[in-house]
Each structure stands twice: as C-alpha cells, then as structure tokens.
Image (cartoon, coloured by chain):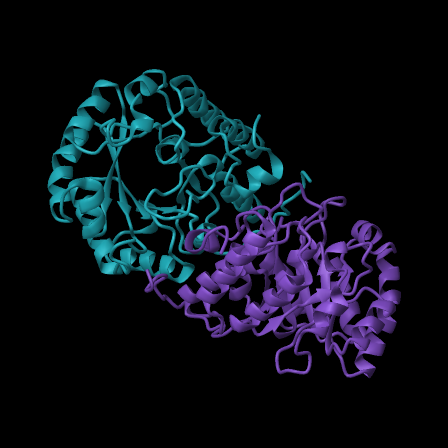
Chain colours: A purple, B cyan
Amino acid sequence: MNDLPQVHMKTGLPERVRIYEVGARDGLQNEKTIIDLETKVEFIERLIAAGLPIVEATSFVHPEWVPQLADAADVVARLPLDGPLPLPVLVPNVRGLARALESGCQHIAIFASATEAFALKNLNCSFSEQFDTFKPVVDQAVRAGVDVRGYVSMCFGDPWEGRVELDRVVETGLRLFDLGISELSLGDTIGVGTPGHVHDLISAFGDAGVGSDRLALHFHDTYGQALANTYAALEASITTFDASAGGIGGCPYAKSATGNLATEDLVWMLNGLGIEHGVDLDVLVSTSTWMAGKLGRPSPSAVVRALGGVSA
Amino acid sequence: MNDLPQVHMKTGLPERVRIYEVGARDGLQNEKTIIDLETKVEFIERLIAAGLPIVEATSFVHPEWVPQLADAADVVARLPLDGPLPLPVLVPNVRGLARALESGCQHIAIFASATEAFALKNLNCSFSEQFDTFKPVVDQAVRAGVDVRGYVSMCFGDPWEGRVELDRVVETGLRLFDLGISELSLGDTIGVGTPGHVHDLISAFGDAGVGSDRLALHFHDTYGQALANTYAALEASITTFDASAGGIGGCPYAKSATGNLATEDLVWMLNGLGIEHGVDLDVLVSTSTWMAGKLGRPSPSAVVRALGGVSA
C-alpha cells in the first residue's frame, strides 16, 4: 500500500507545515512508566533521524512534580544542543531556567494557563500572578539569546471551570507576547474543542493582531477531535502543529488515557493532502513501535497500530 | 463538564445531519465475539431510544459467511418494522432479499465494490458481474415497495489494488443509481482516505449529476482520519453519515482492529458545531459502555472512553 494515501491537494491550505514534536516531553511526562536515560536519548535521536524539524527534549520542572523527567540535565547533556535542530526544554521558573542555561539549552518553553483554576492547580499561583513568575524567566532567557515559546493550557475548556472564553485565551497570549515570547502554542489540554471553536479562536487572535504565523496548535485526542481540529486549523492558515510520536502521553486531568495528537496520524493526513513536512513516516512508525514496547502498551496512534505493532 | 464542548457554529456547514447507525450490522459483523439474540435486540432498542433516526439492524448474508449475524430473521422478528423509524437490513442477492421480504423488512441495502479485487474476494464475482447480481434484487425490492440503499466499498483505496480512481467509484455509483437505489453510501473500507480526497470524490459525483443529498459517507478510523474526513464532507454539504455506536467493528481486511467512525465522536463534533442530529449523547454513551462490556473490550470510541467506561 505504498501508494496510499492517494494525494489530493486542497486549495487554500498551506504548502508546508512544521511539526513540533512533543513526545519526549509532553508524551513521557504523562506516561506512568518511567523511561530510563538511555532509552530517552535514543528516542530523541530516532525522532531527529525521522526528519522532525524540532524536538522538545525534556522539562526542567522540579523532579518532585514530574519524576518521569527528573533526569533532564542528563538527557540534554547527551544531545547536540549547538546543532541546527532546535531541541527546546520546558522551564517553570527562574530556577528551571538557570538549570537549562547551565546545560547549554538554546530554546526554552514556558507554560501558562488560560484559567484561574488550572493556574492554581498546576502553577500554584493565580491567573494574574503567573505572569509575574514568567517575566524574569523570559527577560533572562532573551538576554541570554535564548528563544522562548509560550504554551497556554485549557484554551478550549477547563475540567473545573467548564467554558473558557475566547477573550480570556487571547488576553493570556497577548500578555505572553508582551513578555517577549516568539511563538504561542494554544493547547486543548483536555481535548474538548471542535473545528468551529478552533476557527473562532484563531480568528480572535487575528483580530487582536496575532497572525497565524506566530501561533501553533496543540491538540489532545481525548474526545477524538484532534485531527479534525487540525484540519480546521490548516484551513485557518496555521502552519505549526504540536504532535507526539505514537500519540503517547495521556492527560492526567481527564478520565481517559488518550493523549496528544499522534504525529503519525497527522503525517498520514498531510501526506494525503500533499502538504510538505519532511518526516519519514516509516522511520517514525518504527520508532513509535519500539517505544510502545518500552512503555508496555499498544500505541494510541491509529497509524502506528495499522502499520506497526506493539513492540519492535 | 455539561457545557462542553462549547458551541461554535461555522458558516457553510449543514444545519442538520442524519446519522445512519451501523453498529448492529457493520459493527457486530466484524467483532470476534458473537452476541446473543436478546443482547442484539436490546442493543437496537437502546440505539432507537438514543434518538438515532435510522438503525441498520442486521444482514441476510449467508450464515456461513457471517456467523455473527446468523440470527437475522430472529432479530428482525422482534423489531417494529412497520414503525416510523427505518430499520434497514443488508441483502447480498435474491435469496437474501426473499428472506428479508418474508420477514417484513421495508428497507434494504446492497453492497458493491469499486474494485475488481474486492469484488472477487468479497462477492465472488467480477466487478462487472456484480451489477448482474444486484439488478434482480433492486427490481424485486422496488416492485415490493422496498427502499434500497447502495453501499460501495473501497472508494478511497484497496488493500490489494492500492489506488482507486475517482472515475471508477463514480461509475460504480452511477450503475447502482441506474438500477434504482435511492441513496449511495461511499465507504472508505480500509480507512486510508484524507480530506482532500473526500472533497474531490464528492465533487466528482457532483460533476456526474449526483448531488450531496443522494450521498452518504461511511468512514473507518483505521488510520485515524475518520472525523477529519467527516468534517471535510460536511464542508462539501454532505448531510448523511454512517457511524457505529462505540466505534465497534474492525475491518477484517486491514491489520488494525480499528473500526467504524464512532457515533459518539461524531456527535461530540456536531454538538460543538451546533449541527442538529437528534441523538442524546448520554444515552448513547451508556449504551456503548454496556455493549463494550458484552464484547469484553474497551470501546474504540474516544468519547465513550472519556465519558463512560468499559462496562455498564
């Protein structure tokens, strides 16, 4: 079936997209199984070899919060941080930033919340206070010549608050841009969004002066909507999509174990649409099949299950 | 989370769609577990109670081919075939039609192949010969005042032939309309299609004089594309979608066990888009949770896994 999917381009869609691979960070931090250092490094190396243009490597969050990524410094010590490929790391505060800078990281990401409830639960501060935490992080990073991405969680709904208004998400993003981030990733952390909502949120950012070139979309597949939402975002000219190889990483705040949009399922759709991305699907499926074996469960990715298996 | 998904309508989409529920037939015929008569009847009754506007009940295919549905006559004997709700049954040939008519069925469906290879494998005849088989079936059904739906398999790719040309699918559909069917369901039997392909196939039918009001789309989620393809079909004005409660029914011709588009995942998206459908999601999730217990495996539907459980 090497000639499948058949290529049928659609007018009005981008010619090329950038896949921002989050499996090694957002994926592994939400898996129950703790993966050893050697396997993590091999995972990242294999993701790079598959042609992914940017691979988020790990998180410098305190090990007590995320024991799965306690070896962050050891992971990045093994990676080509000075190479052409960006290998961002997550940092929660100035202490995390200091560790990341000491390790030689050139790209960081900070994570904000669009809601009061999730700020309190995940960041231990109020919605407004989070920006006070981020300001010195972004200031110091920018002074060090380090690029900063901003994530916003709960952009399409919140497990405690329910509805999240578009204006609130736009406000959160604008305040992060004001601090100095270069790119904003809008996260549907609990996977409840649908295509019209995606369209409206991107439009609301456009109305506020933030074009699609400064936005990334970060979908979770908890309610099966991730790829439909991706297609709606493509129609709204978004060209950066976060995805997790093999779809690993359940959201700990939803009942389901369903996680990030699977990179392979995204690549299958892009291949069918004739949209360039630079990723070798066979190498990626092989990588995710191998990682599913390490995690001890079948891959949540439909493409990996169809083309690969549960272990290498 | 009763106020999720948030409703965001999108211009250009239909205001209302009809969900053609195939779980009791396409779902159960492809499950390994054989479900007993009482459970099947209860399943169909619960699907009706959930508000589904049309529920395909079973198949009068020879029991040696599909032992899961060997009790077809017993199932329909328990159903309100004279009621306002259509309860179609699949028939492969005039013998199957005779059994369906004897049982009082008012709506039947026939199943054709867009490819030579699948016609030979599934129908034991060539692509051209299949229409000779269908002609007396449709003739006799129409004379009996029975409505006939036509399914076409392998519309987006074939596991043996690979590519399937749009023209071939359109030819298949037109020949079925010439025989007298009232509605055509275009099946992505192995789930390989992508949104541009969906758009182009619907356009090709439009060019041949078949409007979106006479077409249904039947997606499988083998490669995770079903809901994105559904969204593309909505944008092309399709208003009838086949779906299977709980996503049950793997395709026996693909390596993966992933089956039909889950009705619940479709309903979640339609709810978010503000598109009317008449289905009560809670009742449906409860039904699929109960059926997952009978089948002894977690539901393939993301929404059922997120909102329900693995057993009632």
Horizontal side of residue A200 vs B43, given as left or right: right
Residue placed at 17% from the left, 24% from the top? Answer: B98
Q: Measured from the top left, where is residue A273 in percent x and y? A: 42, 66
Q: Measured from the top left, where is residue B56 in percent x and y? A: 35, 31
Foreground: B279 or B256? Answer: B256
Q: Measured from the top left, where is residue A175 in percent x and y? A: 79, 68
Q: Measured from the top left, where is residue A188 in percent x and y? A: 65, 55
Horizontal side of residue B33 vs B59, given as left or right: right
- Residue B197 lies, with reference to residue A299, above or below; the image says below
Horizontal side of residue B309 vs B209, given as left or right: right
- Residue A34 lies, with reference to residue B270, above or below; the image says below
Residue placed at 68% from the left, 73% from the top? Answer: A78
Foreground: B258 or B201? Answer: B258
Foreground: A233 or B31? Answer: B31
Residue placed at 50% from the left, 64% from the top? Answer: A284
Numbered circles on residues, count: 0
Quadrant of the image for the C terminus of chain B?
Answer: top right
Horizontal side of residue B79 vs B114, given as left or right: right
Foreground: A110 or A238? Answer: A110
Classify residue A179 by image quadrant. Answer: bottom right
Asked whether residue B290 is in view, the answer is yes
Classify residue A22 by image quadrant. Answer: bottom right
Quadrant of the image for the N terminus of chain B?
Answer: top right
Asked whether residue A229 is in view, the answer is no
